[in-house]
């Protein structure tokens, strides 16, 4: 507990939940006036998306769905070589965000299929744009030539 802050004051702060389950929204130093609310909403949604995509292995998991069609949990696990708990958690996040659908079959052994939604397929086109951009640019600093001093 912070120094000089009573327990009741700490508990009284409301916690905002993000549209994507389990993610905390980005905070803004801007005021929450009506005109700023729309800007904050869109920037918070972007922050939520980037937080989701920034989780370990998330882009690799989404990449496994680029061709569309269903994928079984066991196949994904072997393909990506991830621990079952990690893969399960990331798949739950993607289902919760509406990027994947989960279908369970009443079979023995149990079978679960995951399939990308239209929202995910639209996101893949953005990934294609990023790949094109990265093929033309690197992430190295730009060197700027400093002109020689001609006054001296």
Image: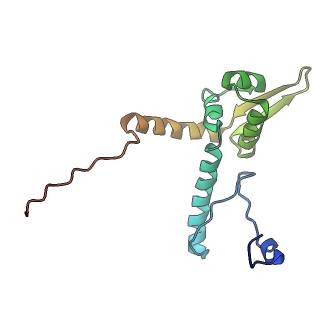
Quadrant of the image containing the C terminus: bottom left
> Which residue does the image show at 74% across and 72% down from the upper left?
2
Check the image and report above or below for 88 versus 93: above
Q: Position of residue 132 (x, y in %)?
A: 43, 35
Q: Position of residue 37 (x, y in %)?
A: 61, 69
Count of picture labels: 0
In this view, the residue in front, 54 or 72, is: 54
Based on the displayed image, in which of its 4 quarters is residue 24 positioned? bottom right
> Which residue does the image show at 75% across and 51% down from the upper left?
21
Q: Position of residue 89 (x, y in %)?
A: 76, 39
Based on the displayed image, in which of its 4 quarters is residue 107 positioned? top right
Check the image and report above or below for 98 versus 77: below
In this view, the residue in front, 20 or 14, is: 14
Q: Is residue 95 left or right of residue 133?
A: right
Give the image's coloring scheme.
rainbow
Check the image and report above or below for 26 versus 69: below
> Which residue does the image show at 64% across and 28% down from the upper left?
64
Based on the displayed image, in which of its 4 quarters is residue 78 positioned? top right
Quadrant of the image containing the N terminus: bottom right
Q: Is residue 26 left or right of residue 87?
A: left
């Amino acid at each position: 507990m912070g120094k000089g802050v009573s327990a009741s004051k700490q508990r009284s702060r409301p916690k905002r939940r993000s549209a994507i389950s389990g993610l905390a929204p980005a905070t803004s130093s801007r005021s929450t006036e009506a005109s700023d609310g729309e800007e904050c909403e869109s920037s918070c949604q972007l922050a939520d998306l980037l937080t989701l995509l920034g989780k370990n292995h998330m882009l690799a998991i989404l990449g496994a769905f680029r061709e569309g069609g269903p994928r079984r949990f066991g196949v994904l696990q072997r393909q990506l070589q991830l621990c079952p708990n990690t893969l399960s958690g990331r798949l739950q996040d993607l289902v919760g965000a509406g990027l994947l659908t989960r279908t369970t079959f009443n079979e023995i052994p149990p079978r679960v299929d995951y399939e990308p939604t239209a929202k995910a397929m639209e996101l893949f086109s953005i990934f294609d744009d990023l790949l094109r951009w990265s093929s033309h640019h690197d992430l190295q600093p730009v060197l700027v030539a400093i002109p020689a001093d001609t006054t001296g």
